């Protein structure tokens, strides 16, 4: 499986998605540091929301095969500027979380505006969209040059 790095603001659902992808029971856990595992890199939302800490995300992106930009469907605005994926030298996908609340169509539109050509809609609690995301991560990706 390709290694996925999850990026997004606090409460976007990164840690819950990590638990769902691993087949673990879902429980609340506030990520305080970058969680580096075999196939997943879970990042604190504060790293996305704070300019100084954002540099750490750029460094950890080199350890990933795929970078997943997460956005909760009930977000009132996007933290991702238009075309920001062009700055990442890894494949970048969009992941809309908590699709049963808010406006998942708007969240997907914002992720596409950021540059995500592939967007998944998931609900980590019900498992909706998790098999499709796992199938995608199990497919071979383009070569990565370090």
Image (cartoon, rainbow, N blue to C red):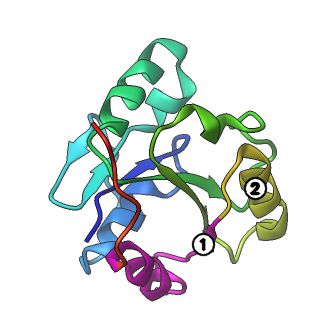
Residue 66 painted magenta = no
Taking depth in this image into account, of 100 and 4 the one nearest to the observer is: 4
Question: Which residue is under mark 1?
Answer: 120
Q: Nearer the viewer, residue 40 or 146?
A: 146
Residue 84 placement: quadrant: top right
Local crowd size for mark 1, using a 10 Å CA cut-off: few (<14), some (14–19), many (≥20):
some
- Residue 107 percent coordinates (x, y): 76, 58
Q: Quadrant of residue 49?
A: top right
Q: In terms of sequence position, does the residue under pointer 2 or pointer 1 come before the other?
A: 2
Which residue is farthest left?
A: 38
Q: Is residue 91 visible?
A: yes
Residue visible at 53% across and 44% down in the picture: 8
Up-down relation of residue 6 to residue 73 (above or below): above
Look at the numbered disc 2 and give the secondary structure of its residue.
helix
Q: Quadrant of the C terminus?
A: top left
Position of 121 with respect to 29 (left or right) is: right
Residue under label 2: 112
Task: Give the magenta range.
Answer: 118-138
Q: Residues within 10 Å of mark 2 (few under 14, many from 20)?
A: some
Residue 135 magenta-highlighted: yes
Residue 144 shown left or right of residue 104 in the figure:
left
Question: What's the residue at 46%, 77% (across, down)?
Answer: 133
The reply, left or right, for residue 4 in relation to residue 117 is: left
- Find residue 83 and report its horizontal and vertical position in percent: 73, 38
């Amino acid at each position: 499986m390709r290694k996925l790095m999850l990026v997004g603001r606090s409460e976007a659902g990164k840690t819950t998605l990590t638990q769902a992808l691993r087949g673990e029971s879902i429980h609340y856990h506030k990520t305080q540091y970058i969680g580096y595992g075999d196939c997943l890199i879970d990042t604190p939302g504060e790293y996305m929301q704070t300019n100084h800490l954002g540099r750490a995300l750029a460094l950890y992106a080199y350890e990933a095969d795929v970078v997943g930009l997460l956005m909760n469907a009930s977000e009132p605005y996007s933290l991702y500027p238009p075309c920001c994926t062009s700055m990442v030298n890894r494949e970048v996908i969009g992941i809309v979380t908590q699709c049963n609340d808010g406006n998942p169509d708007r969240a997907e539109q914002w992720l596409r505006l950021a540059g995500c050509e592939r967007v998944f809609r998931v609900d980590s609690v019900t498992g909706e969209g998790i098999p499709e995301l796992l199938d995608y991560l199990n497919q071979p990706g383009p070569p990565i040059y370090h």
